[in-house]
Each structure stands twice: as C-alpha cells, then as structure tokens.
Image (cartoon, grey):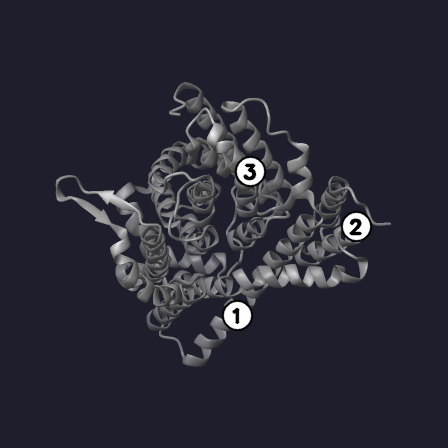
Amino acid sequence: MAIGNPLIVFVIGLIAVIALLVWLKLPAFLGLVIASLIVGAATAAVPLSEVPTEIAGGFGETMTSVGIPILMAALIGKGMMESGAAERIVRSFQSVTGEERSYLALWGSSSALSIPVFFDNVFYLMAPLARSMRARTGRDYALFLCVVGAGASTTHVFVPPTPGPLAIALELGVDLGTTMIAGVLVAIPTTVVAGILYGRWINDRLDDIPLRETMGSNAREVEELAELPDSELPGLFEATLPILLAVVLVALSTTANYLFEMASTGVSASLGPLGTLNFAAFEGPLETIQPATAFLGDPNFALTAAALAAALTYLRVRQLDRDIWTDELVEALKSGAHIAAITSAGGAFGGLLATSGIGDYITDLVSVGGGNGVMVLVSAWVIAAAIRIAQGSATVAMITTAGIMAPQVPELAVHPVYLALIIGAGGNICSWFNDSGFWLVKEIGGLTQTETLKIWTALTTIVSVTAFVMIVSVASVLPLA
C-alpha cells in the first residue's frame, strides 16, 4: 500500500539503507538500488509500475554529471600517483610548510580550487595528494582528508561564483561582490574549526587509517614512491600540469560566464580617478567567446585534458611498454566505473526521496514566521538543513530555500547577505547515505562507511553549525540593514 506522507517514506528509506548497508553489509551499489526500490514502492508519488524507470532515470541523471569526470579522475589518480607526480607536489608543499604543517598546504589548495571548480572535481584532484602525503608521513590521513573536505565544501556553499551560492545571491538580489567577501570571511574560520581543529581531534581518536587500494593505486606502490630520490620524480611543472589544466580551463569558463552575466545586466564598477568601467561594453566580445570557453571549461573536457596529461607523464617517467601502459589505464578505469556506479546509485536514492515530496512537506511543516530579523535566519537554516538531510543534495536544498525565503528580503531587518550565507550553511549539513558526495569521498578516499561517517558526515555538520552560530551572532550585533 502506497504511503502519501513523505515523512513516513523518508523514515522507511532511512531504515532500509541502514539495514542494507550497515547491518547486512551489502555492497553499496546493490544496497542503494534495493533501498531506492523500497522507497519507490512505499511512496504514493510514483506509480508502482514506474518505480524501476524512475530509479534508472535518477541513476542516469547522476551518471550524466559525474560519469566522465569520475572516470577521468581515476586516470588522473593513477597517473599522478604512479608517476610520482603527487609525491613531487607533496615534497614541494613540505619544503614550504615543513612536514609538521604540510596539511596547511592541502587546506589552502582545496579552498582556492573549489571557488572555480565543483567540490567533487576538487576532491578528485586533491585525493592523490592526500594519499601521497599519508604515505610520506605515515600518519594523519584523517586530518589530511578533513582539511581537503573542509576547504572544498565551505567555499562550495559560501563563495560565488560557485553555482550554489551564485544562484542564492541572484535569487535574493544580493550584490555578488558583497557575497564573495562575506563568504570568504565565513569560510576561513569555519574551515579552521571543521578542518583543522576537528581534523586533529578525530585523527587522534581513529586508529591510523591505512592506505587501501583505490583509484588504481595500492599502498605498497605509493609507499615505494615516497622513498624515491627527487631525481627519479617528474619536475614540478609537469607534476602539477593535470591540476593546472583542470583549474585554468574551468576557471576560464566560470570567469567568462560571470563577466557575461555582469555585462548583460548593465553593471558598472567605479575605478576611482580612472573613471567607471561599464561591463555592458564587453557584452558582444564575451558573447562571441562564451561558446568556446564553455566547451573548454566543461568538467568533461577539462578533466579529460588533465587525465591525458597525467597519463602521458606516467608513460614517460615509468618508461612502460605501450600495451602495459594501456592495460594499467584500463584497470584504473574499472576502479573509476565502480565508484561512478555507487555515486550514481546514491543519486538515484536521493532522487526517489525528493520525488516523494519530502522537500515540499518540510517547507510546509517549518514555519517561516517569528519576526523579520534573526528568527528569519534561523528559519532559513532549519529549512535548508531539513531538506538537505531528507533528499541529499546541498545545491537543491540551497536553491529551494532561497526561493522560499526571497519574499522575506524586502522586510528583512538584517542585511540579506546574512540570509544568503545561512542558507548555504544549512544546505551543507550532514552528508550521509543519500548524498552522492558521501560515496565519492568514501570510495576515492579509500574509507570504510564508518570512517566516512566519522570524518565526512561529522565534518559537514560541524561546518554547518559553526557557520550558523557565526552568522547569527554577527547579524545580532551588526545587522547592517
């Protein structure tokens, strides 16, 4: 019998996924597909005959967005790890920060990269460095993953032109420059708390996490590379070329899109004594180059270019026979295909929960009333957090909440940038089994489910709560309305 109440359907889905993955310990892909079937059969929002098709659609939609990037990330990981490129970058980091503080380099790199590049792409690029750093130091893998995750996830939800916060700023009518500055001011202390402080705390309390085989590399090979002399490693430019290619190409597209948006809306900027810069004057040239930058900056192309660079470095440094090189790359693609399948199954599970109507149910359940200042901020965070926990996608939670809260902006007793930031904070909370990002971190990081919950799920929750406390506290003292 189909159930009309989405909250009951959500509880059924929660119990199902815990029973299948935690208690019965089924393979993640199988467990998530079965959990999706259970949710589809339970909800009245989808006819029973259409449940398998709905699951396949959700799986395909996620695979469309992550399939090629994950497969290319597998090649990037394989090439950078086994050529010694990741080891070369880690040694360069440590020559600047020292071995004891090498995690700071991972933190800064992931934070900067995730402004122009999606979180998942940042994690693809940074995971080989975290693994190589773990092999070199022999410790602190949980800390390394925490600083990478915190750096990438905070800018992902707070700092435009990342799509989530960009969409929120446009929906609420908040100045993008103000949102960028405020987002950075929130992101930095939040990453210190969640990435460094919590990272150190959980690192001390977890048994030392071993380097397990993932993305085509195993612990023995990574540890052997950590012992090689510098002369047998690729040069720094060649080592960083895959990362540089991905970041520059994606940033090129992001920048062009941002400038075109500014130009099409007639925005101008004061240059002081030099006069005024009118972006509208550049609308024609930007419109001409935008198709090319969109092609080059698409993650499917950018990561393919990065994968080719990593693979060629692997071939050159290891001096492999071409047939052996091809076989090694195919093995990496097999590993990537498994990760893509699990990630897409997680997307299908979250999509079924969303189709059940849980998002609309929560927004109707949570009252937006209670004043037009700080209480509106609290309500926005609660709505975004509840939608995120229920259906898995941070971006969906953020955009949905922004649409709900937009009518409140004219009467808001605090600056609307606070509203934009607190929606991002709520949307980041508690990444768990229904979030494709959870499975991405687990599989690419080489973690168990329990380790992922302790590291990643806890970290995203700490980011959310820390930012909430910070934003509400500052808004109460400096409303800036």
Residue 6 % position (x, y): 74, 43
Crowding around mark 2 (Cα neighbors within 10 Å: few <14, some 14 to 19, many 20+) is some
Name the quadrant containing residue 337: bottom right
Amino acid found under the numbered disc labelled 1 = Glu
Name the quadrant containing residue 361: top right
Amino acid found under the numbered disc labelled 3 = Ile
Mark 2 or 3: the one toward you? 2
Q: Callout 2: helix, strand or loop?
A: loop
Mark 2 or mark 3: name the one nearer the start of the chain.
Answer: 2
Q: Which mark is residue 331?
A: 1
Mark 2 or mark 1: name the one nearer the start of the chain.
Answer: 2
Residue 113 % position (x, y): 37, 50
201 w.r.t. 69: above or below: above
Q: Quadrant of the C terminus?
A: top left
Q: Circle 2 is placed at which residue position?
A: 44
Residue positioned 38% across, 42% down in the render = 107
Q: Callout 1: helix, strand or loop?
A: helix
Q: Circle 3 is placed at which residue position?
A: 429
Residue positioned 37% across, 45% down in the render = 106
